Amino acid sequence: MRFALILSAILIFFSAQAQEKDSTQSWIVSEINLQGNKITKDYIILRELEFQVGDSIQSERLNYLSDRSKNNVFNTGLFHIVTILPSYNNSEISFTIIVSERWYVWPIPIIENADRNFNTWWQNKDFDRLSYGLLLDWHNFRGRNELLQLTVKAGFERAYEAAYEFPYINKKKTLGLRFSGGYISNKEVNYTSIDNKREFLKVEEYDIQEQFYGNVRLTIRGKLYSRNEFTLGYTNTHISDTLKTVSYEYLNNNDLRNEYLRLSYLFKFDKRNYIDYPLTGTMFQFSAVKRGLGILDHDVNLLEAEVTFNNHFHLFKRLYYANGVTAMTNLLEKPAYKYQRGLGYGNNFVRGYELYVMDAQHFLLTKNNLKYELIKPGFKTFDFIPFKKFNTISYATYINVFADLGYAFDDIYNQQNSLSNKLLLGYGIGLDFVTYYDIVIRTEFSLNTEGDNGFYLHFNKSI
């Protein structure tokens, strides 16, 4: 009996040692095979991997590195599906990466509403406030993840715009360039806000605002998850006497024209699992924009800074939590109405206040989401559709409860807008659908501290 116990202890000891050795085993990456990238150049995929040929990978990090690499490749937006398969041979490991490419050339009909979101437009359903036209969106141009965009719009807003982006211009693939420019004109312009609703001036006979712009952006991406962007731009805005009469301070210096050079900087660290609908990971972003360099006759002198920090957590099983904080401030001179921003613009709004704007020179905003994975992410292939780039549809559904807090600091327009300089709270419940080509559809029932409630529809992620 005593001998059996001793023998058992010895076997357990050596078994534990063997397991410990196995957990610290390492492999040398001998080969990386790519399959399915008929258009995309190999280096576009290899640039996103957490491992390269010749690297040593310990067993306990293998799953993490494979999952991160899969997410990174998927987040390029070039593929429907990404699969990474390891293969072992003694002390070596090889990887086979299988991708399913998307369709890259999109001549997209444009139907845009002039309001800040669909819900504001839906109140009046004014079809005169729609812009229509055509957008040529050519992703992965030449298979190098370059982007070509051409836009022509008519209706509420007339626009002719073009952009071309090179993700890499050097051998190390750390530098990128983007060129953009265009002309935009309007017969109707938002010139102020009253009772936290935007007011518009419309003249049928002629344009009351015209704008020319051009930008050159340099991107530095030394590492996988962080990048720096430096942009030099030129903007020339001209308004009519009619608009100036109605809004004397629409442009800086009470001028009919603002012409300035713009220098901006952006730093972004993004290590979320899927950027279009993240469930885990962190994103930090800082940006600063200086309008006016003291060179041109109709110059301005504005400096704006903004910081955003988002965190996403997997709590347990199908439950996730997300928190986002954004702060914006204006320095130097106070911005004229055209250049001011506040809450209610873009994605910077308190849910429950979709129908309002809080014009401000500074703001704070925090968003909170508790998500439950109702339908797990999956794929459905429809064999009767002959085109492989369109016959596989991704899907996932999440139910969530949310609560947002915001504060808009305003000492210019606050006399006519009661929601400025006031704590704003919105909360509610929603259902999110994530599907085909990164489409996100959010349906939400929201309430706010003003006693308003309603159903709202959105077409992007909340955080």
Image: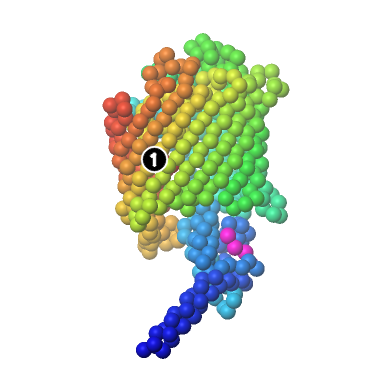
Mark 1, Cα crowd under 10 Å, few <14 / some 14-19 / many 20+, is: many
Is residue 249 left or right of 4 when viewed as pictured?
A: right
Identify the residue position indicated by label 1 in the image: 368
- State whether residue 446 appears in this view: yes
Which quadrant of the figure has residue 7?
Answer: bottom left
Q: Residue at the spot x=58%, y=17% of the render?
A: 252
Residues rendered magenta in the picture: 49-53
Residue 50, magenta (yes or no): yes
Q: Nearer the viewer, residue 237 or 71?
A: 71
Q: Position of residue 276 (x, y in %)?
A: 46, 48
- Which element carries disc 1, helix, strand or loop? strand
How many numbered marks have been drawn onto this rendered protein structure?
Answer: 1
Above or below 304: residue 11: below
Q: Position of residue 340 (x, y in %)?
A: 52, 24
Q: Position of residue 134 (x, y in %)?
A: 50, 39
Residue 97, magenta (yes or no): no
Q: Nearer the viewer, residue 86 or 55?
A: 55
Which quadrant of the figure has residue 227?
Answer: top right
